[in-house]
Image (cartoon, rainbow, N blue to C red):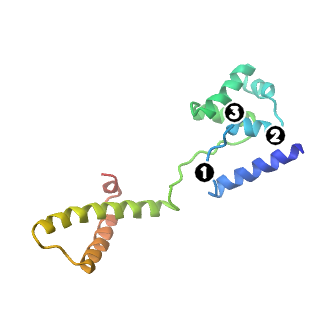
Amino acid sequence: MKHLSVHQLDDQIRQYVNGQRFDRIPQGWIRSSRTAIGMTLKQLASRLGFSVPAAKNFEMREVDEAITLASLRKIANAMEMDLVYYFKPKQDSLDDLLQIRAELKAKELMERSNHAMILENQEADNKNKSREYDRLITEIRNQKLSSLWD
């Protein structure tokens, strides 16, 4: 039965690594990992060179998102694990993220342009609007990437 928690945590880790899961583990990685490998709080504290209350404080600070990466790295090492830290786009890829930003920028430009054209009774038809929208996206994507964030 004790090995079940090891397999469950291994499955969760794989889901995060494979991008299938993004939510937080409610009890935190420190506690989940520590208990899955059968390490007591006292053993973790000893390996860290801290008191048991200090080790418990690390677990609580992680859950509260108030722990440093340096502390997490030290704790991971004490449990003979690696800390993996990265940013993942909310979309499938960075290219998808940039495409969406370019589309939003193009839409903003089109809305401003269309408003002025309506005031002058020169509104374009849907076919020309679509063509202009696609042209703007291409133009925006060819500019410096920093222009996507203005």
Number of residues whose C-alpha sits closer than 10 Å to that of mark 3, classed few (under 14), some (14–19) or many (20 or more): many
Q: Is residue 26 visible?
A: yes
Work out whether residue 92 or residue 78 is closer to the camera in this orientation and state it. 92
Tell me, for residue 75, which label it has, or none: 3
Residue 125 lies left or right of residue 23; in this view the side is left
In the picture, residue 51 is in which quadrant?
Answer: top right
Disc 1 vs disc 3: which is toward the camera? 1
Tell me, for residue 7, which label it has, or none: none
Q: Quarter of the image for the N terminus: give it.
A: top right
In the rendered image, the residue lying farthest to the bottom is 127
Residue 61 lies left or right of residue 141; in this view the side is right
Work out whether residue 101 or residue 50 is closer to the camera in this orientation and state it. 101
Above or below, 40 relative to 131: above
Q: Residue 124, image x and y in percent?
A: 19, 76
Query: In the structure shown, which secondary structural element does the residue marked by tag 3 occupy?
Result: helix
In the picture, residue 48 is in which quadrant?
Answer: top right
Number of residues whose C-alpha sits closer than 10 Å to that of mark 2, classed few (under 14), some (14–19) or many (20 or more): some
Can you identify the residue that label 2 sits on? 37
Amino acid beneath label 2: Ile
Q: Residue 42, image x and y in percent?
A: 80, 24
Can you identify the residue that label 1 sits on? 22
Amino acid beneath label 3: Ile
Tell me the CA gap for discs 3 and 2. 14 Å
In the rendered image, the residue lying farthest to the right is 1
